[in-house]
Amino acid sequence: MHVSLGDVLCGNESKGMKHLGILQEWFGIHWWTSRYFALLIVVLFILLPLVMLRHIDTLRYSSAISILLALAFVVISSSMAFYALWCGKTQPLRILPDFSQVTVFDIFTTIPVFVCGFGFHMSVHPIRAELGKPRDMTCAVRISLLICVVLYFAIGFFGYLLFGDSIMADILVNFDHNSNSYIGSLLNDIVRLSYALHLALVFPILNYSLRANIDELVFSNKNRPALALDTPRFVSLTLSFLALIYLVAVAIPNIWLFFQFLGSTTIVCISFIFPASIILRDVHGISTRKDKVVAIGIIVLAVGTSAIAIWSNLYGSTADP
């Protein structure tokens, strides 16, 4: 998320083409519009106050705003696509990939993107623990998945209508193109800013789950107080994670690098391999034979598709001039 924030605010370089960020378009290229400084300001004045909140229910308003911002992004981009369609400027749609440009194995490189998009189920249990009626969690999960599917489909579909084969790994970068009108330029900036702020407001919820899981892994002593009640432990973990994530966001120049390799390894393990392994281990003796068979199938598919995706990414990286 921080990598995308850096792309939107400060731009990036892909395939020899320089894409300017919003700050650089507005104020020019200076040290205070650079990636490291802009992200530092975001971390200190937006993210730090939110991640210092000790209960996940206090993030409900920022979470609601983030969803509204994502909807605003979809509404504006779809309106731009319909307008381009009306003017006959949209890109032609394609049912199947152009296999003169890609191979079948290249399709596997999209799997890490899907995994990253739906790989944050670890937030379910902390949210469920603070619900007034925990049984409502099932309905909340289904609604969340439906919203994600609709948003992802709409962004991909309308983004391809607008940009076609020139679409970037981070679609927000495509909105840096100069428009022929003031309204068009304004909409481009609103699209990028709205989704960048959406990413910033979503991060604290994901950070909450990460912090809770790492705390339980490292400080597993049952005699210790809860994390929210132990101020030194809470602050040290929070600041350490925020600093590490900031450094990674500054170091990684393009979001596609994250999707390519972390999506094929770390996220696959967290989303599929580790949960399936827990079912197979079955410490409490509650897994059925069907559960174990499904778990084995998931592990085999996850390892197989991940291996093909990594091989395709490495081969593509070496093949590029």
Image (tube, grey):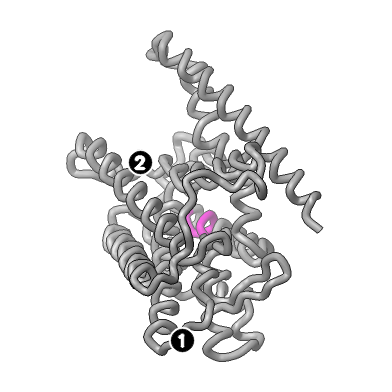
The residues bearing labels 1 and 2 have C-alpha atoms spaced at a distance of 45 Å
Q: Residue 129: x, y in percent?
A: 29, 40
Mark 2: which amino acid? Answer: Val
Q: Nearer the viewer, mark 1 or mark 2?
A: 1
For mark 1, give the secondary structure: loop
The C terminus lies in quadrant:
bottom right
For mark 2, give the secondary structure: helix
Residue at x 31%, y 66% (from the top left corner): 75
In this figure, which residue is indicated by the disc labeled 1? Answer: 180
Examine the rendered structure and indicate whether residue 291 appears above or below residue 46. above
Closer to the camera in the image, 145 or 180: 180
Examine the rendered structure and indicate whether residue 275 appears above or below residue 189. above
Residue at x 66%, y 34% (from the top left corner): 308
Q: Residue 193: x, y in percent?
A: 43, 74
Query: Which of marks 2 and 1 precedes in the sequence?
Result: 2
Q: Please identify the quarter of the rendering in which residue 126 is found.
A: top left
Q: Is residue 236 magenta?
A: yes
Residue at x 43%, y 47% (from the top left corner): 209
The part of the chain drawn in magenta is 234-238
Closer to the camera in the image, 113 or 134: 113
Mark 1: which amino acid? Answer: Asn
Examine the rendered structure and indicate whether residue 289 appears above or below residue 311. above
Q: Is residue 103 left or right of residue 299?
A: right
Residue at x 59%, y 64% (from the top left corner): 246
Q: Is residue 127 left or right of residue 244?
A: left
Q: Please identify the quarter of the rendering in which residue 40 is found.
A: bottom right
Q: Residue 109: x, y in percent?
A: 61, 43
Q: Main secondary structure of the magenta part?
A: helix
In this figure, which residue is indicated by the disc labeled 2? Answer: 124
